[in-house]
Each structure stands twice: as structure tokens, then as C-alpha cells.
């Protein structure tokens, strides 16, 4: 048991390392092979990392709910969009200092997540409805959330007012970017980009810690393994489900705020654009795998950025799906996913 | 005796009335605008001549629609005071076209029921695509009612004329517009920009899944080629994208003198911030019509100072005035307390163009008005010398502008130096 665990761990580390190496190689070598000149690869790599970290953080919510409940929560993208709006609107309407928007959106996202569970999932679970019904029901919840946002905020793009962004340290984004000259590689990066990457990875590590190292995490894993067993161990299964939805919602809320900080155009449909990317991310990385979601996020961003970098910007949106197709053919469980053991 | 008396009275009245009538025509001060000499004073017109006016008076587009409505009212007052239509009075039948296609359709439905000679409006291009056919589309054609000319004063979508012609045959010719489509703005603008900024190379970015930005891209390419500018990089993106850093990185690395962007308003703000704040690009960014939304340079909701150095073509700029527009803007500000913008100037021009068509046709019949409208040529307006070309598209000299701290300045060597600090 211990040994096979170690093998698994080594394997996932090896795959991660291989993929990361691939991304880096792609940045420098493949363009030469394709005889396409890539101008400023370092700048492209910067983009991959910071865009990828937002993708990963967003996709984690899918992975979390899937790993515990075994069902995709398709309203996750709508919670993400609401997280963005909670952040932006609290600043625009109530002059909330920009620092508080992240915890506020995480709390708001978490509450919406729990509400989605109570309204769209719990009643179906109680009736032992098949998982496909829960999937459809979450799709409905998503439509309701998007429409509510449309009613409340309208459809023209919203953003964190530039004046409030200036409150951030180092005059992030609005200031000129820092030019970094590192080992002869020159690229530009803004403090805001760095903050987004740091916050995203910190939240991902925190979640990994929570699931792997804490008592609650253990309870979550037991519920994921078998709800009946969890019941016998007097773990509150309903409580764990709600906690899972709260955590996933909070992650969505955080990703929403980071997204709104990164891009000045939040609309009620922002979530829809992200949904497809997020699903690609978790299937690429391995459904239900936290590390897989992180890797998948970077990969999708890498495909998008490098398609453009080598001069095929028109292929940008298609390339992640080509990769998805190949992975499904050769490694259906995803890069870091474990082969599914059919449960009784 | 009786008859002699009667005759005397008649002659007396006639002699008195003649100068009175003549005086009535020169009652108000004759405005600078108008085809006073090219078309004789109308003799057949009398009573009320009705035109429909349908602008956005509510919801989002009201920021454009309200000045449009005010400008039309000002023009109509001038037209009637000066006796431009002889004995007849021009009357505006006004409907609120709202900001959506649906509200515009209901406004147009009400207007055509009023037997108007022409309709001015609506504010937005997508409203026009939906509502204009109420006046000349298939249903109207089949009903046997006269088709009514529609004059757009702020519809800038490229290809509206050909779209209407394809859908409604000859009825499509009843659509006319004062506002220049991109196909007319871009070539004139590029010529001025290349000349003033001394541009030799550009990189182009455009949204390739939107027909309007894609067609504007083609117009840009041919205009740039005509001006002898080399295109050193071309990148595409999709409408709805928010991250353009990869494309911008490529373009900036190709080191062009300027970046040309054909995008819709929603993509412009992130694109500008990424180019300036994230990637540190400081050169000129030449934009299509999407950049004509004042919101993009707003310090709070738009790209703020990141929009500095954006060069965009427009129909009119407060810094490039002729005597007609100077007179209009002064009068407008006096009347409404706010300075006139491009939308007001275009609406004012549109109203005078329609009135001129009615005067020259000497008829309120919609078909006769259309014929005179189509013949509009070399008409002096606040926008400059205005004509319809052989394809029915509006023509006047566009104006190249540069954005600085939220203001659209006239592009000159001085204003460019001010922005780029050279």
C-alpha cells in the first residue's frame, strides 16, 4: 500500500515535471523546429504562468466538487462570475476598500455555492436521482445565476475603477510595468500579475493542505470514498457536502476577483467563456485531482499563448481541445488522474 | 361699381400681401446652411410637412439620443423661422426609440402611421437594421403604402446600404445616412495619420470572428497599402477575448511605428491596458470606429491614461470648425447649456439635408423627397462639404483625432508631440 502510494506520487511528480519541461521547451525550441520565429519567449512564458494560475484556481472548484461528490457542478462558472461582481460592485457601489474584496467575494461565492447545493443538488441526492439529473440541475442553477446578474448589473462590461486600483501597493497595473532582465532574458511584469500568481498558488496550496493533512480533509476523503462508510464513522455527510460546496464557491469567488483585477471587462457571460476552459483544464489534468487542475490550467494557458506566439492566433481556442482529444485517446484518466476503479 | 371696388380691394390686398409674403420668407435671419440658391423657393408646399424623429430618449443610448433630439429641434426651428420651406411648416413627429431594436421598431411603427415624409433616426446601427425596414421593407412594399425614406445620422456600421438592398431590393435605397461608415472614415484618416505621424510600418490586430471588425481590417489594409505603409505583423483574436498579451507581445517585438486595431468597444479597454501598462508600449495605436466611444478613455471605467496616443477617425471634431458649425455650436450651447458633440452636429446636418430634399423636390411625397435626397451633392454643412456618392454612401472629409487624458484632440503635429512627448 505504502509502496504503491509512493510509486503513484513519483509518477505524478514525473508527469508534472515532464509537462512543465515541455512547456519550457516549447517556448524555446519547438518554434525553431516549426521554423516559426518566436519573439520574446520570456514574455510569453510570463503570460502562461499568470493566466494559467487564474485558470487553475478557477478549475479547482470543479475538481473539488467532482472528487467528493462524483458529479460536475456546472454552476461553478456562474459562481465565479458572481464572485467577480461582488468584488467590483462592492467597490463601485459601497466604496469598499479594494483589499477587502477578495475575502468578501470568497465569502459571497461560498454562500452562493452552499445555496446551489441546497437548491440544485441536495433535493436530488435525497431522492437518489442519477448523477446526470444533478448535472442538468446545476446547469439550470447556472442559467438562473447568469440571468440574475444580467438583471442586477446589466450587460455592459464592468471593472474595478482604475482610481481604486491605484490603492494597491506599488501602484499596480496603472504604473509602468517592471522590466526584468534575468540571465539575458528580458520581460515585463506588473506587481498585480505577481500578486495574482502568488494569491492563486497560495490558495491552491492551502486547499491541498486542507484536503491532505487535516481531519476535515480526511473526512472529506472518506465521504468521497464511500458515503455509507462515512456515515458509520459518524461523519456528517451532508455537512461535508456543504463544506465542499462552500470551499468550491470560495475558490470561484477568489478566482472571480483575481480575474476582474486582471481584465477590465466583467460581464454576466464572463463565466460562460471560462466554463469551457475550466472543464478542459480538469479533464486534461485528471478529473478530481487538485494537482491535475493546477497542471491543466498552465497547460491550457500554454496552448493558447503559444498558438499565438508561433503565429497561429486563429488556432488559439481550438488547440486546447486538440490536446484534450489526444489525452482522452491515450490517457483517458487525464494527466494526473488515477485510473477509475469502478465502485460498487 | 361694386366690381370695380372689389377689384380695387383685391389689387390693394395683392400689393400689400406681396411684400408681406416676401418679408415673411426673410423673416428670420437666413442661416448659413441651406440650398438657398441651388433650389428655388418651393411653391407647391403648404400647411404642415411632417417628418418622423426617432432617437434613444431612454436607457443606455440616451447619452447620444438626447443631444440628437435637441439638435433636430434646433434645426427645425431655424428652418421654419427662415421660411426655408416657403408657406409650409416643418413639423417633427417625435417618438422615443429607446436603446434596443424592439423599442425602435415600435417607434417606427407609430411614425409610419403618421404619414411622415421621411424619418430621421434611430440612434444605434443595430436598431436601424431592425427598425428601418418598417418604413421600406417587404411588409410595407406588399401593403402598397408609400415607402418612406429613413435618414440615419449616427449609424456607422459598414455595409448597411448593401444589406438593405439585398433584403429589400429597390426599397433598400430608401435608407440614407449622414454618418460615415468605416469604409469612408478609415481611408481619409489613415492618409492624415501617416502624413502627420510619419508612419512607415504598422502591426495590425483585429477580431476575425466579427464581420464588422473583419471588414474594417480589410479597409485598413488597402488604405495602408495605398499610403505606402508596410504591415510587419498581423494578429487576430476573437470577439469576447480578454487577454491580448500574446498577440501584443508578437506585434511589439516586430517593432512597428504604430499598432492598428480593429475591435469592438468591449475588447478595447483590456487591449489598451495590456499594451500600455503590462507591455509598456508607448507608440501610437490607430483604431477603427470602436474607439469612437468616449467611455474607452474614461479614467474610472475605461482605460484612462492608457488610452493616450490612440488615434481614431471621426466625422467631426470641435477643434476643426467651419463657419456653419461655429454658428451651430454657439447656438446649441446657448439653447441647451452644454457644448454640442459629434452626434448633435450630425443630427443637425441630417435635419437640414432632409429639409433641403423637401425644398428641392417642392413636394412632401416620400418618393419625391427620396429622389431629391439622393441627388444631394456639394451641400455645405457643419461636417464640411457633404454629398452622397454613386453607391448612395455619405461623403465628407473625416477628421483624425488623438486621445489625450480623455479628450479627443484634433491630430496635428503639435498635439502628437504633446502626447508622445517628442
Image (cartoon, coloured by chain):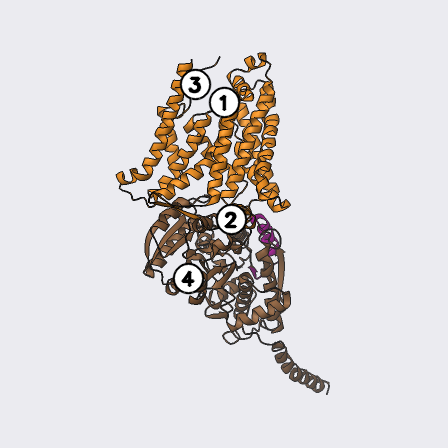
Q: Mark 1 points at which residue?
A: A212
Q: Residue at left 31%, top 39%?
A: A28
Mark 1, Cα crowd under 10 Å, few <14 / some 14-19 / many 20+, is some
Q: Colour of chain B?
A: brown
Q: Which residue lies furthest to the front in this view?
A: A183
Q: Is B103 above or below relative to A259?
A: below
| Left or right of B26 on screen, residue B5 | right
Ranked by sequence position, the earlier of labels 3 and 2 is 2
Residue extent of the magenta highlight: B99-119
Q: Residue furthest right?
A: B2
Q: How far apart are marks 3 and 4 (CA)?
A: 62 Å
User: What label does residue A171 carry, if any?
Assistant: 2
Chain at tag 4: B
Mark 4, Cα crowd under 10 Å, few <14 / some 14-19 / many 20+, is many
Q: Report the number of numbered marks.
A: 4
Query: Residue A29 placed where, x, y %?
Result: 29, 38
Q: Which of marks 3 and 4 is in front?
A: 3
Q: Mark 3 points at which residue?
A: A340
User: What label does residue B158 carry, if any?
Assistant: none
Amino acid at each position: 500500500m505504502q509502496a504503491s502510494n509512493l510509486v503513484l506520487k513519483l509518477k505524478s511528480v514525473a508527469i508534472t515535471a515532464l509537462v512543465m519541461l515541455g512547456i519550457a521547451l516549447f517556448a524555446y525550441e519547438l518554434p525553431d523546429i516549426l521554423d516559426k520565429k518566436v519573439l520574446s519567449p520570456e514574455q510569453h512564458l510570463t503570460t502562461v504562468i499568470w493566466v494559467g494560475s487564474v485558470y487553475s484556481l478557477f478549475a479547482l472548484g470543479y475538481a473539488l466538487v467532482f472528487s467528493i461528490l462524483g458529479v460536475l457542478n456546472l454552476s461553478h462558472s456562474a459562481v465565479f462570475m458572481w464572485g467577480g461582481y461582488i468584488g467590483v460592485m462592492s467597490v463601485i457601489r459601497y466604496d469598499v476598500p479594494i483589499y477587502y474584496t477578495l475575502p468578501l467575494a470568497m465569502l459571497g461565492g461560498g454562500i452562493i455555492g452552499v445555496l446551489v447545493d441546497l437548491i440544485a443538488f441536495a433535493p436530488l441526492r435525497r431522492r437518489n436521482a442519477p448523477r446526470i439529473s444533478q448535472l442538468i440541475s446545476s446547469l439550470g442553477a447556472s442559467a438562473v445565476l447568469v440571468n440574475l446578474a444580467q438583471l442586477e448589473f446589466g450587460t455592459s462590461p464592468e471593472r474595478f475603477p482604475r482610481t481604486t486600483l491605484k490603492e494597491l501597493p506599488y501602484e499596480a497595473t496603472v504604473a509602468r510595468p517592471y522590466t526584468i532582465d534575468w540571465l539575458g532574458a528580458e520581460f515585463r511584469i506588473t506587481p498585480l500579475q505577481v500578486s495574482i500568481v502568488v494569491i492563486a498558488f497560495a490558495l491552491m496550496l492551502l486547499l491541498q493542505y486542507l484536503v491532505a493533512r487535516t481531519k476535515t480533509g480526511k473526512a472529506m476523503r472518506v465521504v468521497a470514498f464511500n458515503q455509507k462508510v462515512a456515515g458509520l464513522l459518524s461523519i456528517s455527510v451532508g455537512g461535508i457536502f456543504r463544506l465542499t460546496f462552500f470551499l468550491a464557491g470560495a475558490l470561484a469567488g477568489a478566482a472571480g476577483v483575481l480575474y476582474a483585477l486582471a481584465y477590465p471587462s466583467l460581464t454576466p457571460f464572463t463565466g460562460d467563456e471560462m466554463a469551457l476552459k475550466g472543464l478542459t483544464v480538469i479533464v486534461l489534468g485528471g478529473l478530481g485531482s487538485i494537482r491535475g487542475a493546477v497542471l491543466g490550467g498552465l497547460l491550457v494557458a500554454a496552448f493558447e499563448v503559444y498558438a499565438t506566439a508561433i503565429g497561429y492566433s486563429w488556432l488559439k481556442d481550438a488547440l486546447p481541445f486538440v490536446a484534450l482529444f489526444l489525452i482522452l485517446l491515450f490517457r483517458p484518466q487525464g494527466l494526473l488522474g488515477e485510473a477509475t476503479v469502478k465502485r460498487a | 361699381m361694386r366690381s370695380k371696388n372689389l377689384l380695387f380691394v383685391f389689387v390693394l390686398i395683392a400689393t400689400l400681401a406681396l411684400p408681406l409674403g416676401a418679408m415673411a420668407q426673410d423673416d428670420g435671419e437666413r442661416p448659413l446652411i441651406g440650398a438657398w440658391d441651388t433650389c428655388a423657393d418651393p411653391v407647391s408646399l403648404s400647411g404642415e410637412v411632417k417628418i418622423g424623429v426617432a432617437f434613444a430618449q431612454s436607457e443606455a443610448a440616451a447619452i447620444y439620443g438626447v443631444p440628437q433630439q435637441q439638435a433636430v429641434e434646433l434645426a427645425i426651428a431655424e428652418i421654419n423661422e427662415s421660411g426655408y420651406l416657403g408657406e409650409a411648416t416643418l413639423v417633427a413627429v417625435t417618438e422615443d426609440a429607446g436603446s434596443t431594436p424592439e423599442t425602435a421598431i415600435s417607434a417606427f411603427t407609430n411614425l409610419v402611421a403618421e404619414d411622415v415624409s421621411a424619418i430621421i433616426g434611430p440612434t444605434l446601427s443595430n436598431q436601424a437594421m431592425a427598425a428601418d425596414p418598417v418604413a421600406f421593407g417587404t411588409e410595407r412594399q406588399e401593403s402598397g403604402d408609400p415607402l418612406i425614406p429613413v435618414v440615419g445620422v449616427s449609424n456607422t456600421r459598414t455595409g448597411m446600404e448593401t444589406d438593405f438592398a439585398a433584403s429589400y431590393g429597390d426599397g433598400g435605397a430608401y435608407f440614407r445616412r449622414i454618418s460615415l461608415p468605416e469604409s469612408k472614415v478609415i481611408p481619409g484618416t489613415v492618409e492624415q495619420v501617416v502624413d502627420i505621424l510619419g508612419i512607415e510600418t504598422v502591426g495590425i490586430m483585429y477580431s476575425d470572428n466579427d464581420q464588422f471588425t473583419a471588414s474594417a481590417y480589410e479597409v485598413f489594409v488597402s488604405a495602408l497599402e495605398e499610403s505606402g505603409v508596410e504591415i510587419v505583423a498581423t494578429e487576430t483574436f476573437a470577439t469576447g477575448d480578454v487577454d491580448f498579451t500574446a498577440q501584443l507581445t508578437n506585434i511589439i517585438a516586430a517593432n512597428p511605428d504604430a499598432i492598428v486595431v480593429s475591435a469592438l468597444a468591449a475588447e478595447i479597454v483590456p487591449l489598451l491596458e495590456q499594451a500600455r501598462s503590462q507591455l509598456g508600449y508607448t507608440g501610437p495605436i490607430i483604431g477603427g470606429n470602436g474607439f469612437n466611444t468616449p467611455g474607452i478613455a474614461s479614467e474610472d471605467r475605461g482605460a484612462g491614461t492608457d488610452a493616450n496616443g490612440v488615434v481614431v477617425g471621426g466625422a467631426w471634431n470641435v477643434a476643426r470648425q467651419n463657419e456653419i458649425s461655429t454658428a451651430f455650436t454657439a447656438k446649441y450651447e446657448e439653447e441647451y447649456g452644454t457644448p454640442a458633440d459629434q452626434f448633435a452636429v450630425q443630427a443637425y446636418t441630417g435635419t437640414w439635408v432632409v429639409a433641403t430634399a423637401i425644398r428641392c423636390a417642392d413636394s412632401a411625397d416620400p418618393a419625391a423627397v427620396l429622389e431629391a435626397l439622393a441627388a444631394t451633392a456639394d451641400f455645405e454643412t457643419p461636417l464640411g462639404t457633404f454629398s452622397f456618392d454613386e453607391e448612395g454612401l455619405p461623403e465628407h472629409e473625416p477628421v483624425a483625432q488623438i486621445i489625450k487624458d480623455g479628450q479627443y484632440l484634433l491630430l496635428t503635429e503639435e498635439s502628437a508631440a504633446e502626447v508622445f512627448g517628442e
